[in-house]
Amino acid sequence: MGRRITSSLLVAGAVLAFLGAGPAAAQKQTLHMAYWAGPSHQMVQTLAAWIKTIEEASGGNLVVEIDKAALGKMEGQYDLIRNGVRDLGWAVPGYTVGRFDLLQGAELPLVCPSPAVCSPVVWKWYAKHGLAAKEFTDTTLLVTFMGGPYGIHTVKPAKTLDEIRALKIRAAGPSLPMAKALGLNAVPLPATETYEAVQRGTVDGSVFPWEAMTSFRLNELLKGHLEVPGGLGAPSFVIVANTKAFDNLTPENKAALMKASGEAGSALIGKAWQAADEYGRSDAKQRGQAIETLPAAEFERWKSLLQVVTDDWVKKVGQKGYDGRKLLDDLEAMIKGASS
C-alpha cells in the first residue's frame, strides 16, 4: 500500500513538474531581424531601445536578434520578410513602388513637419481607416514611423530653384516625385550610396532629412543646407513581421510584441528620429556650415510646383476606390490636432 502511494506521488510530481516547466520553456522565443543602414546610422540605437521594450513586455521571453551586416539592399528589405528570410525587418515603402500608395499619403509635401508628432498620428490614421488590412496583406505590420522633413543639402550653398536646378541632386524613393515636380536634375541613388557619389562628383547634393547628415556622415561633404517650411515631404518607414513567424509566437509573446509596437512603438521611434534630426542640424551648425531657409516668395513658387505631387496621389488612390482628398484632409487635421 505504501509503495503504491509513493509511486503515485512520484508520478504526480513528475506530471506537475512537466506542466510547470512546459509553458515556461515554450515561451522562450527568438525573432531574427534584418538590418541594412550601416553601423553609423541612428537606427542601431533606436532599434535597440524598441527591442528593450519588447523584452520588458515579455518578461524576457521574447528576444530579437538583429543582423550585424546588411543582408540585402534597402529596396529588397520588405521581400526578405515577406519571403521568410528574416522574421522582422525595417522597410521603406517608397522603395516598393505601388504596394503602399495609401500609407505614402503621409510622405506628401508640407504634410509631416515633425517625426515625433507625425509618427504616432500616421499609425492612428492608418488604423482608423482600416488601411493596413488593404495594403499589408502578405506581412504583419508592427510599426509605422516618419523621418524628418526633407531639405536640400549641397556641396556649396544654393538658395533658389534656379541655382539648385543647375546641380545634380540625389533623390530616390519617396523624394523622387517631389524632385521631378521641381524640375531638379535628379539622380536616383539609395541613401547608402550617397556618400561615395558625392565624393566621386556623381552628385552635388541630396534631398534628405537632417538625420541623414550624421547617419550617413554627409555633413563631412555637404556644407550648404536649405530648409523648406513644412518640409518638401518626409519619408515613411515600417517595421513588419513575417506572418508565419508572428503566428508561431505564443499568445503571451505575441501580445508583448504588439504592446511594444503599434502607437507606442511609432511614438518611441518617431521621438528618436526627431532627436536625430536635431543632432544632424546641430552638427552642421557647429561645423560652421550654411543653413538657409527658403525665402517666402521662393516658397510660394515651390509650393505651386509641388501641388502636382499631391494631385497625382489623390488621383492614384481614387483609382483604387478611395477618396484621397478626404483621407489627406483627415491626416492633416489629426497632425494639426497633435501639434497644438
Image (spheres, rainbow, N blue to C red):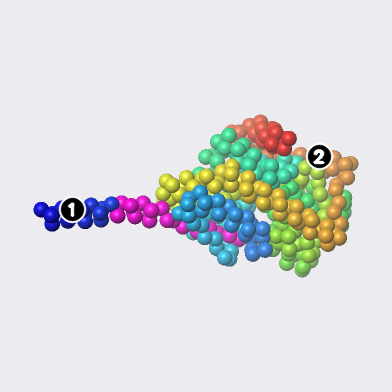
Counting from the top left corner in percent of width and height, residue 67 is at 55, 63
Q: Residue at x 63, y 55 (%)?
A: 46
Q: Determine whether 44 is above or below 299 in the image.
A: below
* Front residue (pair 288, 220): 288
Residue visible at 64% across and 39% down in the picture? 121
Residue 317 percent coordinates (x, y): 63, 37
- Badge 2 local density, few (<14 within 10 Å), some, or many (20+)? few
Which residue is tagged 1? Answer: 8
Instruction: Specify the quadrant of the image occupied by residue 335.
Output: top right
Which callout, 1 or 2, points to the residue nearer the camera?
Answer: 1
| Label of residue 304 in the image | 2
Residue numbers of the magenta segment: 17-36
Residue at the image position 10 percent from the left and 53 percent from the top: 1
User: Could you tell me if residue 264 is visible in this image?
Assistant: yes
Q: Amino acid at mark 1?
A: Ser
Which residue is at 42% across, 46% downward?
Answer: 251
**Image position of 101 with respect to 31: above or below:** above
Q: In the structure shown, which secondary structural element does the residue marked by tag 1 occupy?
A: helix
Identity of the amino acid at label 2?
Answer: Ser
**Residue 23 is one of the magenta-drawn residues:** yes
